[in-house]
Amino acid sequence: MLRMLKKFFDFCNNKNRHKFYWAVVLGVADAMLGAMRIPAAFFAITAVLDNRIDNKSIMVVVAFMLVSTIGKTVVNRFSNMLQTEGGYDTCALKRIEIGEHLRYLPMGYFNDKSLGHITSVTTNTLEQMSDIATRAVMMVLQGSLTTVVIAAGMFFFDWRIGLISVFEIIVFLLVNIVTNKRIAAVADEKIEADREIVGVVLEYIQGIAEIRNYNIFAKTGSRLEKSVERKKKADIKAETTAIPAVGLQMLICKLAGVIIAGASLYFYFDGSMGLNYLITMLMCSFMLFEPLDSAGIYTALLKIIGKGVDLANEILNIKQMDIGGENITPGNHDICLSHVSFAYENRKIIDDVKLDIKEKTTTAIIGPSGGGKTTLTSLIARFWDVNEGSVLLGGRNVKEYSFDSLMENFSFVFQRVYLFEDTIANNIRFGRPEASMDEVIAAAKKARCHEFISSLPDGYDTVIGEGGATLSGGERQRIAIARAIMKDAPIIILDEATANVDPENEKELTEAIENLTKEKTIIMIAHRLKTVRNADQIIVIDKGRIVQRGNHEKLMKEDGIYKTFISGRKKAVSWKIA
């Protein structure tokens, strides 16, 4: 129990940890104020039995009760505020910390880990902790402290009852340890089931179009049903394990009270305990284990809290890329790759690549699928770190740049565009939140999307669905280009940005890209003849190596992948329905 409590406190930052420490201090005060009812009752009982009830006696009893009641009310109010603020603030800050941590992880992590895992930790796990953890931690601490204070007070009244109380507390703790081990055995299964179902549901929703298209509801539905069934069984198992364990603890608490009452009666009848002490001990027999009973119920949740801390720390402990470089503004934007190699999961993807890209030139990268085109651009922008060799920007290794200052030099337009569930204006100004509305409109006009935005009911204030689902592919692409224009980075990376655009949008998209790329260094992954043939240099990548390089005229004189690529595109363009 103490280990779990320490783990939770270590999980909090200093500010919130101190809030919990103060809440513990107030918990001690609450326990002592609650225990004041015992001497108040003892004083009143003694006065009644001695037939010396007077104003002074009444005032003393009333004073004790007022201090106890008012004190507990005030202390509980501040204690609960500290617990609530500390709990919610801790989990809110951890979500932000995880988000910041994810910014600097290698992109391979996101290929490795399911979206469901991250989502489950940042939503379900941390939500449970903000709601349950603080209550459980403080109930365990306050319940234990209150019982200890009352037990210590019982020694003052009768050392024999005090010893019995200590023995019963030890028995309760031993049973609590055993029952918590049983609950811990099923807690991992429940947490894993919670995590799995989030991933399965997300995958089902995100892939609903493909599921409908290929009519594979039976297969995907079966997986979803299995996940739901697993969660149901895990929840039931957790409850059926916890309920008997908690019930046993409650029974021990009730029996402990009965034993104290029986022992007190025995001592009274053998003449070794006065009537006033007997009545007080009978009262204490009910009061002693009530807070410990509540604490025992919540100790069962400490394992889940500890597991939640572990899951959050698991993400935060993923090794980040070395981002502690300098804030560098390069003198030029020449890019140089020197003997660059990169492997992912023991599979070499880029193999000894040497490449020079002069600033304000256009480099087109083509090659077979899986040849390493996207990986190469990712290494240039340092989404991954190279295993061998170096990538230089402006004569400086990209590892020497702080990550944020490096990203200032790049804008990206991908084949698959992600737009956020926000207004179109805010999506465009994503890279420059401070940009004025006039600047947003100017960028949209250059990206050839002002006209269709203006035709929407709310114009630039139109809230688009998550991922831009309410817009067509061409519209999403043009908004992404407007976003890149707004950022105005000197290097533009286009990853097959026009690959799946319909003919109606192609003209606007081509003009938008031309506006984006004026006076910029362009690196494009492209499959369209128009976008390739005018490049200053063309790189052909196959199996992670550059197998051809040169301009269009040079490569067309060579037998190889490029000539085959161009011939295939020409045939495709000339193809007609007879």
Image (spheres, rainbow, N blue to C red):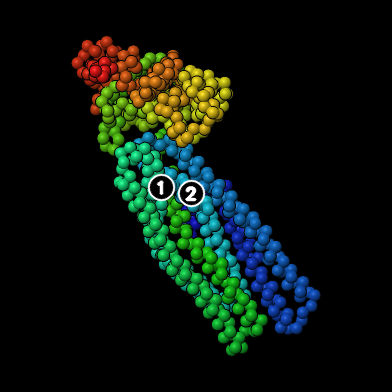
Of the two numbered discs 2 and 1 in the rendering, the one whose residue sits closer to the viewer: 1
Tell me which numbered mark, 2 or 1, is placed earlier along the sequence: 2
* Residue 198 spot, x, y in % from top left: 41, 47
Residue 323's tag is none
- Secondary structure under badge 2? helix
Mark 2–mark 1 Cα distance, whole angstroms, equals 14 Å
Question: Circle 1: is it few (<14), some (14-19), or many (20+) Cα within 10 Å?
Answer: many
Give x and y (percent) for residue 48: 73, 81
Residue at figure coordinates x 43%, y 38% from the top left: 102
Q: Are marks 2 and 1 in contact (CB under 8 Å)?
A: no
Where does residue 412 sit, x and y in percent of width and height?
42, 25
Quarter of the figure with residue 33: bottom right
Instruction: Specify the label residue 126 is tagged with.
Output: 2
Residue at the image point whose x is 50% and y is 71% from the top: 250
Task: Label 1: state its secondary structure.
Answer: helix
Q: Nearer the viewer, residue 203 or 261?
A: 203
Which residue is disc 1 drawn over? 198
Name the spot of residue 151 as percent of width and height, x first: 57, 72
Amino acid type at mark 1:
Val
Asked whether residue 300 is in view, the answer is: yes
Who's the residue at 61% across and 88% down the image? 271
Give above or below for 4 relative to 35.
above
